[in-house]
Every structure is written in C-alpha cells, then in structure tokens.
Amino acid sequence: MEKKPIVLSGIRSTGHLHLGNYYGALRNFVEMQNDYDCRYFIADYHSLTTQPDPSVLNPNVRSILAEYLAAGMDPDKCTVYVQSDVPETCEYYTLLNMHAYLGELEKTVSFKDKARKQPNNVNAGLLTYPVLMAADILQHKANFVPVGKDQLQHLEMARNFAQRINHFYKADFMVLPRPYEAKGEPIKIPGLDGSGKMGKSEGNCIYINDDDQTVIKKFKKAVTDMTPTEPNSEMNEPIKNLFYFLKLVSAPEVYDQFLAAWNDCSIRYGDLKMQIATDVLKVTAPIRERYNEIYADADYLNKVREQGAEKARVEVRKNLDELRQYMGFRKF
C-alpha cells in the first residue's frame, strides 16, 4: 500500500476554539485525517514563551484537546498528542539549536513583535521559538504543514535548517517540509465588531462552547451602523460581515430572503441577527454538548493522550536516533 504523505500541525494550547478556528483550520484537519498521515499536537511548550502560568497550563490543554475531539478529530485516524508528552522533542530541539544562528533568529518577525509587546519577558525560548517549531516538524519528517501567513517565515526557517544539516553532514535524511494548501478558497470569519477577522485578542468571537443565550446576546450586539435608504444600496463592511455569516450557516433560500429584504429596504436587523444566531447554534450546539461529555471524562482524555504520545514517540525516536548518529552520538 502506498505510504500516505505526513501532515504535521500544532494547535495552540491557550484559549477556547472560536468559529474562526473551526472554519479556518479545524474542519480541514478533520477532512485531512482521512487522506493523510496526520499528526496534530497541542503546543504546550510553545505557550510558555508568553504565558508561563502553571495554574492555567493543564486546564487549557485539557480544554483544547476536548474541543478538537468534540469537533471531529479522531485519534484512531490520526496521531493527536500533547507536545510535552514527547520528551524527545526537547532533545531534537537542542540538537537543532546547534545549527541555528543568533542573527537569523533575531531577525524573525515574530520575535521582534513579541519582544516589543512583552519587553519584560524577552526569554531565550522566545528567541528560539522557530527552532522548536522546526523540531516539531522535522522530527516527524513531515511533508506538509498547514500554516497561515504569519507562520510562513517559521516554515521557511525549518526548511533552511533541514537543508543546512543535510549539507553539513553530506546526507539527505532531513525532509524539507512544504506548506499545505487547502482546497478551495480560505474561509476568513469576520469579527462581530464590524471589521477585521475574528480573534481572541480582539474580543469579537463566537466560541464553540458559548451557550445559547451567550451566542444570541453576542449577535444582538453585532455592529450594524447603516440602514438602506435606497433600493440595491451598497453594503458597508459590518453589514457585509453579517451577510457573510448568513451565507456560511444558513440555507440558500434564507440568505436570498434577507438579501431581497436588504435590496428593497425592508430589512429588520433584529430578525437578521436572530436568524444567524439560530443557525450558528445548529453548528455549535452539538459540538458543545459533545465537548462537555469529553471534558468531564478524564479517563478517556488520558487514554487519548497516552495513545497519541506512544504513536508519536515511535517515529520521533527513530528520527532522533538518526540525527544523533549523523552528529556523532554513538557507542564506541
């Protein structure tokens, strides 16, 4: 049987999933697990560069794992693990650091940005974040990595490290990862504040585990600063955002009904927002119910963690041993 290409992706271990995460990445993850050798990990080591708080680390990891499982990630179809459950990652990271140069790390956009935002916590982990990310990828010999534009520089650095090591040791054992390009147009979920995209730091999110009343309340507060006064008026950004939501979650005939109401100036924003909220809940409510069941089942979550770590460590250990051999770590 032909070997499936390896896809590797990290999952942030802070905050809850929102609709932007769900439509932007998670649905692709769920689809890919049927066609690729997918390895997904919760990046708890990475979170320490900005939030080294032991009181929230474990609950965040538990919550994120439960949310991804509730949304369709299947541990029998893919390898899903917690980064810190694979200690080989730290050794791989250490060995890669010997081929990473201070100058290139200091020039990364993410380092300069984070150093500006947290001037009192410019730690070594922040500086070498791209090396740890490269270790996450290269230790699996991943062929593809789904990344956003903000992470493309890090992926390119991982490729550079792999090329550098292959050249230095006159071998080709490092696989050069490529960005995974999802089929179709990327879905960018707008925020409820009328502009930009949905994001945790902007406070404009609908979270997967928001209850019914919270979702309805948030949509009622969504920005609508324009009422059409002439038929077929051009929509401004906040109105376009609401219609984007409507098209995403509602039936085509419902979308057409409200579009006609906009075009003949009879639209009622209260009805529009309530329709969107109702249809969003049809998507999120089953996931939220499943999440609550999974989150409460510590035995199941620990089983998933252990199974994922065991699967990941088999491949990572083999690839780490290979790197160690090339670097000269071997028996006499």
Image: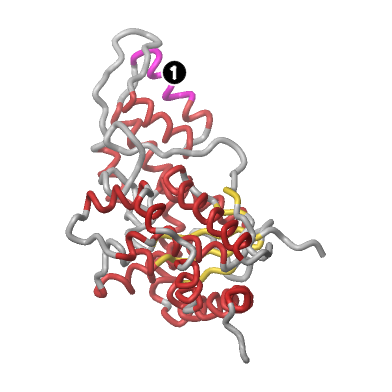
User: In the figure, is residue 113 to the left or right of 327?
Assistant: left
Instruction: Look at 29% across and 10% down and name the residue there.
Output: 229
Quarter location, residue 267? top left
Assign the magenta stretch its main secondary structure: helix
Identify which amino acid the numbered label 1 is placed on. Ala
From this view, report whether residue 145 is shown above or below residue 231. Answer: below
Quarter the N terminus occupies: bottom right
User: In the figure, is residue 174 to the left or right of 109?
Assistant: right
From this view, report whether residue 141 is shown above or below residue 315. Answer: above
Read off the residue under disc 1.
Answer: 260
Quarter the C terminus occupies: bottom right
Outermost residue on the bottom side: it is 332
Q: Position of residue 197 (x, y in %)?
A: 36, 38
Along the line of sight, the residue nearer the viewer: 138 or 326: 326
From this view, report whether residue 325 is shown above or below residue 154. Answer: below
Outermost residue on the left side: it is 120
Residue 77 visible somewhere in the drawing: yes
Along the line of sight, the residue nearer the viewer: 248 or 162: 162
* SS at circle 1: helix
Q: Position of residue 284 (x, y in %)?
A: 43, 52
* Region of the chain picked out in magenta, as a range: 256-265
Q: Position of residue 278 (x, y in %)?
A: 39, 43
Outermost residue on the top side: it is 230
Q: Position of residue 56 (x, y in %)?
A: 27, 70
